[in-house]
Amino acid sequence: MPSNGEVETLLKRALILLLLAPLLARAEETAGPEAPAVGQASPRLEVVLEGLPDYVQPGVRGALSAERQKDSVYLDDLLVDHLARRAEEEALAAMQASGFYRAEVAVEVHNQAPGWRMVLRFRPGPVVLIRAVRVELVGPGKEDWPLVAHVKQFPLVANGPLVHVPYEDFKADWLKLAREHGYLDARFTRHEILVDPEAGTADVDLCMDTGEPYVFGITLFTQEGEQRFESTLLEGFRSWKEGDPYRLPRLLELHRGLSDTGYFSVVDISPRPDPARHVVDVGVRLAARPRTRYSFGAGFGTDTGPRGSVEIEQRYLNARGDRLFGRLRGSAIDAQAEVEYRRPWLTQGRSPRTDYLSAAVDYRRETVADIETETLQLRASAHDVQGFWRRQASLGWLTEVYRVEGEPEATSHLLMPALKLGYRPRRDRRGGGWRLDWEMRGALDGLLSDTSLLQARVDASWTFPVRQHDQWLLRGSLGTSWADDFDKVPISLRYFAGGDLSVRGYGYKSLGPVNDEGAVVGGKHLVVLSAEYDWMFADPWGMALFVDAGNAFNGSAIELKTGLGLGLRWRSPVGLVGLDVAHGLDNPTDAFRIHFTLGVEL
């Protein structure tokens, strides 16, 4: 029999537990479900669909709450029973959306360790077929070509199955297209699908009234902060005038153009439709960024070794938007210093976003194998973009001191006008496309030049998508030179091959004509061809197989050097990153070379 002291102790413990019981219960409620013991699997709900066509299953699964909750930590018998009751209704609604209006479904739930198995057995029945389709466009925009052409993409056809999702997507896209083209009051006056479940047929009737088209009204730019830009500069980014048909893509183009300049930290464009006048006034609110920008970079390249850069930009020097750039770049083989002044081209018909005038001073020192060059270039140029074409006309004066092993130091001076053309068409939906760059420059002996020179070069690249993520990459370069005395042509203007973006498997600028001492001194002509297949086995990761061929040469005979290799690919947010191992077939005793590239895709 317990003593009085023991009884007193037991009573005290019972009293403490009685007082703490409500607090312990509340703690259990707020703590959520008990975590499974170590090594014990969490309860899970398996959802099985039986008797459904494969093409319907994704839509039905997406409509089921049970599918979305199958891994929930709150699963218990009560929740699973609730999900089972909802599953029948949700499944039948999803079946109707796919055209099965007479479907039947039975739901069964079975316990299975460590959770439950929900089986939905379907009897789809006949699919509803479309008996008649009527799609009509009325109103002032009934002959607007983009809206009329979109009707041809209507996904439902007579005698075809009734599927709701493509129909709803078409409606949304058609209405969006109408509003982008200035029909802001567009609406559907009829949008009916009349289904006869017993007969298994449906009639589709859709009619959109465009309403009156809107036009652009006044455009008002307001600027915040101390910096104020000239109205001529800001108006140059606007691609419309008052009274032009309203188009939403033009507002997006204005926003992109102002943002891309780097002038502004705030670009807020507010269209203000006036339904009474069918006019859209546009308000543009701007705030300037800080004047000065600093940037630093570091990296490594197989051609250059460790490299770094420092850049200072004066985003705007005045209200006209003039800019000043200063750049310092260095690596194991070269060093460069450049200063460039840019002025937006504000004359009529020019866009300050893409068109500008520039003056630059560029100093570069490079040491490759047995050649050392020191180059100073002064350049004035004009840049513009017309459609898919990028154009640059320039006049430059170049002076270069170069030292070749086994030869005396030489100096060259050239005054060279140049013209560059680049063609950048739109890429297709799968990312395929091509680009072309053409450049011609020349000099005339006696006109601040040591020799007469004419050079032309063409670079082209193509991307062909294959299967879902794979692709072919093809590129080629052709260059040629005519000179009175090629020995007086600076090393920097001669052609070389070899390296990361040339013929892989060979060293940087290691291919080309050589002097009596065996040093590669560059040639008059250039040919480089490359074919690469990228196999993205686990996108964004992939492998590449490639073959490159090319060389620089002087005469008419071409001795192409060939390199083969394998590579690793990663589609990073900043472009395609490549790590290649390549071997030059013309030098069997040479070791394999490793090449690293960033952004080699078109």
Image: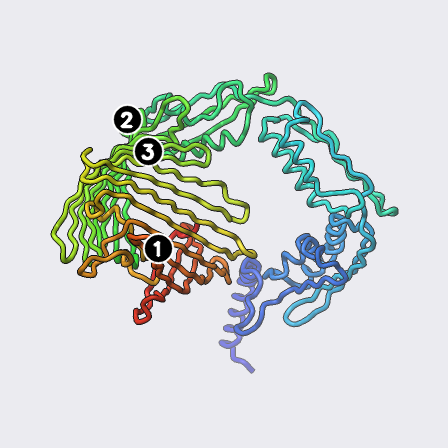
Q: Is residue 567 above or below residue 212?
A: below
**437 sits left or right of 198 in the view:** left
Q: Residues within 10 Å of mark 3 (few under 14, many from 20)?
A: some
| Residue type pointed to by label 1 | Ser
Q: Which mark is residue 318?
A: 2
Mark 2 or mark 3, earlier in chain: 2
Outermost right residue? 198
Q: CA distance from mark 1 to mark 2?
A: 42 Å
Q: CA distance from mark 2 to mark 3?
A: 25 Å
Mark 1: secondary structure: loop
Residue 268 in the image: x percent, y percent?
A: 45, 30
Q: Which mark is residue 502?
A: 1
| Residue type pointed to by label 2 | Asn
Residue 481 makes an appearance in the image? yes
Mark 3 = which residue?
A: 393
**319 sits left or right of 465 in the view:** left
Q: Closer to the observer: label 1 or label 2?
A: 1
User: Which residue is at 28% across, 34% downward?
Assistant: 417
Q: Quadrant of residue 11?
A: bottom right
Mark 1 or mark 3, earlier in chain: 3
Q: Residues within 10 Å of mark 1 (few under 14, many from 20)?
A: many
Judging depth in this view, the residue of 138 and 350 nearest the camera is 350
Q: Quadrant of residue 367?
A: bottom left
